[in-house]
Amino acid sequence: MTIRAEVREFCQHGPLPSEQDDSEHADADPEKRQQLLHAITPPVTDEEARLLTTCFGDDNCFGLAWTLLHLVESAPTPPVTSEPSEGSNEWIMRLWIRYQNSLTG
């Protein structure tokens, strides 16, 4: 399966920046990320979802992390189906909890 160009472009920027980032490019980066994220049309493939999970940052990133989470969840198969190790990214943990909830709901 191939990964679409817009998914690759989004992922090339690495994890989402922190809301606490006060560097020079901090204001422009979330705006650019938002444009790139919204360019990805759901649903994503399982392979794209796994790649996108590497883009979660340390916090909400002004709401972008939630958008990313919903995009990842548009894949046919949940990308996180085994319990992440202690200290894993909070968004990966959230995907795990949401997967567990889907099994009982």
Image: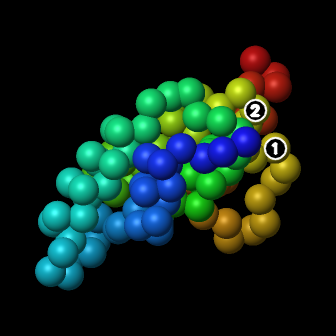
Vertical arrangement, residue 34 with respect to residue 56, above or below: above
Q: CA distance from mark 2 to mark 1?
A: 9 Å
Residue 12: x and y in percent read 46, 65
* Residue occupying image coordinates x 45% and y 30%: 41
Asked whether residue 73 appears in the rendered view, the answer is no
Classify the position of the N terminus by image quarter. Answer: top right
Quadrant position of residue 17: bottom left
* Residue occupying image coordinates x 18% and y 75%: 25
Q: For the residue labelled by badge 2, is the local secondary structure a helix, a strand or a loop? A: loop
Image marks 2 and 1: residues in contact by CB distance under 8 Å: yes
Where residue 81 is drawn, which disc sits there? 1
* Residue occupying image coordinates x 35% and y 68%: 18
Disc 1 marks a residue whose amino acid type is Thr
* Residue occupying image coordinates x 21% and y 54%: 31
Q: Relative to the observer, which residue lies in front, 74 or 6?
A: 6
Disc nearest the viewer among 2 and 1: 2
Q: Relative to the observer, which residue lies in front, 1 or 65?
A: 1
Q: Relative to the observer, which residue lies in front, 30 or 7?
A: 7
Q: For the residue labelled by badge 1, is the local secondary structure a helix, a strand or a loop? A: loop
Residue 4: x and y in percent read 53, 44
Q: Relative to the observer, which residue lies in front, 55 or 61?
A: 55
Vertical arrangement, residue 102 with respect to residue 65, above or below: above
Residue 55: x and y in percent read 51, 60
Q: Please state if 29 lies on the left or on the right of 58 as rendered.
A: left
* Residue pointed to by mark 2: 77
Asked whether residue 10 appears in the rendered view, the answer is yes
Disc 2 marks a residue whose amino acid type is Thr
